[in-house]
Image (spheres, rainbow, N blue to C red):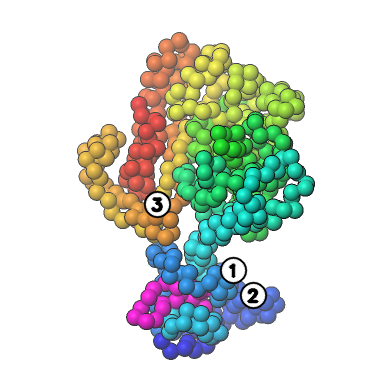
Amino acid sequence: MPRPEKVRLGEILVQQKLLSEEQLQFSLNEQKRTGRKLGRVFVENGFVTEEQISGALAKQLNIPYINLKFYNVNPELVRLIPETQARRFRAIALENRDGSLLVGMADPTDLFAYDEIARTVRRSIELAVVNEGELLQTIDRIYRRTDEITGLAKELEQELGDSYVDFGALVGASSGLEEAPVVKLLQSVFEDAAQVRASDIHIEPQAERLQIRFRIDGVLHLQTEADIKIAPSLALRLKLMSELDISEKRLPQDGRFAVKVKNQQMDVRISTMPTQFGESIVMRLLNQGGGMLRLDSIGMPPSLLKKFRAVLQRPNGLVLVTGPTGSGKTTTLYGALAELNSLERKLITVEDPVEYRLPGINQVQVNEKIDLNFARVLRSALRQDPDVLLVGEMRDQETAQIGMRAALTGHLVLSTLHTNDAASTPVRLLDMGVPRYMVATSLQAVLAQRLVRVICESCTEPYAPKPNEAEWLKAELGDTVAEHRYAHGRGCSHCNGTGYRGRTGVYEMLEMTEAVADAAAHHDPAHFIKVANAQMAGQTLRRHAVALVAAGRTSISEAMRVSNQIED
């Protein structure tokens, strides 16, 4: 392919009537003032989109425009261009073509970049236009730090030598020996976890190897394996970062610390636990720069969202959000707090731990070491004249009763409970020893939820249900099973071959209507669950999961996996 000619982006957009002369002149002045690229000025001011710029360049230069969102890139081919050059020149290798290489560039008129890339790959190159935003996301995903992490782990292993070292005993004496490799290794691990949107990092010593795994979209994936001898060094460094007792290896410990990854603040909750081969460490990653999700963006059906918001506007009562660990309960509660937060209301939260900092809200961290438990903080919080109280979890009878009394005395109380579904929640409260009359009178609503993985839109394709899947769907869809179109993800580079990318919620809500409250006041749990299920008829967790399947948002197998714990 001949070397591209330098063109003026602004003139091209004006010629194709995507930009006015006034907008071009404004952008040129802004470019001189700020030094930003002209295309970025166009996009940030809303004059054109990245897609329009790419399309205009492709038309002018008579080269293809490739939407990377739907392009299954080959990681090995992409790495023909080193990461530093790929980021500097905004370029990505896409396809081998009879002795030449197809390269996607955000700015295919960059002559210097063209020459440098051709020199690096040592072959002629053909050009295509790609969006800069999608290009950078693809680079982040492909140039993962797996090899770098493995190399740093080996470097640390060589630093430590052949013998094990009791770092807890040596504290400062050995810190100069292993600190640099440990810090580099952990930094790479955190950066890689951020790139693949991991929610947790698991560092697990096995008999002969140290295993590092990431939890992505609720499922664990192996990141790397290293020599077991580096495990004590990693544990020591992480304990120092979270201010835990480095000499204590026999008991579990919990802590937190903050790291900065790609100019974003990330809070890390750490839990250590002694195992047969060493200390197992799990870290929950909380991105403080991502912003809190609002209730209307977590996947709640519009009809249920309307009911839930109506419950939140009540002046008092208890509202519970239930589900297993990792089902998004905290996200839902924080979304509710964001809507309730105003100058006219005083909001207090009692949490263990405080996961996200919310402006304008009084958040209290429980600390069992100094006897600052949920019950004690709750009693004090009630003397602070709150309008809304959030209790991180109803863990015991005392906490539940204090929360319910607060709900009966003019406070709106939000909390969580670990139950399988909404109908079994009042029964669980009774099992905890809460008086029956308190459950019937103070509980306003129970929202039960799960998280399901969403089909990767870059590799979604039609899917024909298997006989057992069709039978499962028939329980909710009846004879209309064949009328719907189903999908699944075949797996691609965008989703690391899983077929899924991202998650959304499935929900059901039990409102404590007069009939449900009357049933709760009786001593027959089976009768209560029957009345509760009748109140939620057609709006259950399983029905919502099936609705997502019918809409092509998730696969049948994923809906069945999530529904396995909520079968009637």
Q: Nearer the viewer, mark 1 or mark 3?
A: 3
Name the kind of residue labelled 1 in the image.
Answer: Glu
Say which quadrant the N terminus sits in: bottom left
Q: Nearer the viewer, residue 431 or 406?
A: 431
Disc 1 and disc 2 in contact, CB within 8 angstroms: yes
**Which badge, 1 or 2, is on the more N-terminal residue?**
2
**Which badge, 3 or 2, is on the more N-terminal residue?**
2
Tell me how far mark 1 sits from mark 2, CA to CA: 11 Å
Q: Which residue is disc 1 drawn over?
A: 44
Q: Position of residue 194 (x, y in %)?
A: 57, 54
In the image, residue 131 sits, relative to residue 542, either above or below, namely below
Q: Is residue 101 visible?
A: yes
Q: Position of residue 443 (x, y in %)?
A: 54, 23
Task: Identify which residue is drawn at 51% across, 52% down.
Answer: 224
Q: Nearer the viewer, mark 1 or mark 2?
A: 2
Q: Position of residue 554 (x, y in %)?
A: 37, 47
Task: Identify which residue is drawn at 22% across, 45% down.
Answer: 482
Q: Nearer the viewer, residue 332 or 219?
A: 219
Asked if the magenta segment contains residue 256, the reply would be no
Q: Is residue 330 visible?
A: no
Disc 3 and disc 2 in contact, CB within 8 angstroms: no
Return the mark for residue 366: none
| Total numbered badges shown on the rendered structure | 3
In the image, residue 417 sits, relative to residue 296, either above or below, namely above
Q: Which residue is disc 2 drawn over?
A: 36
Task: Identify which residue is drawn at 24% across, 38% down.
Answer: 468
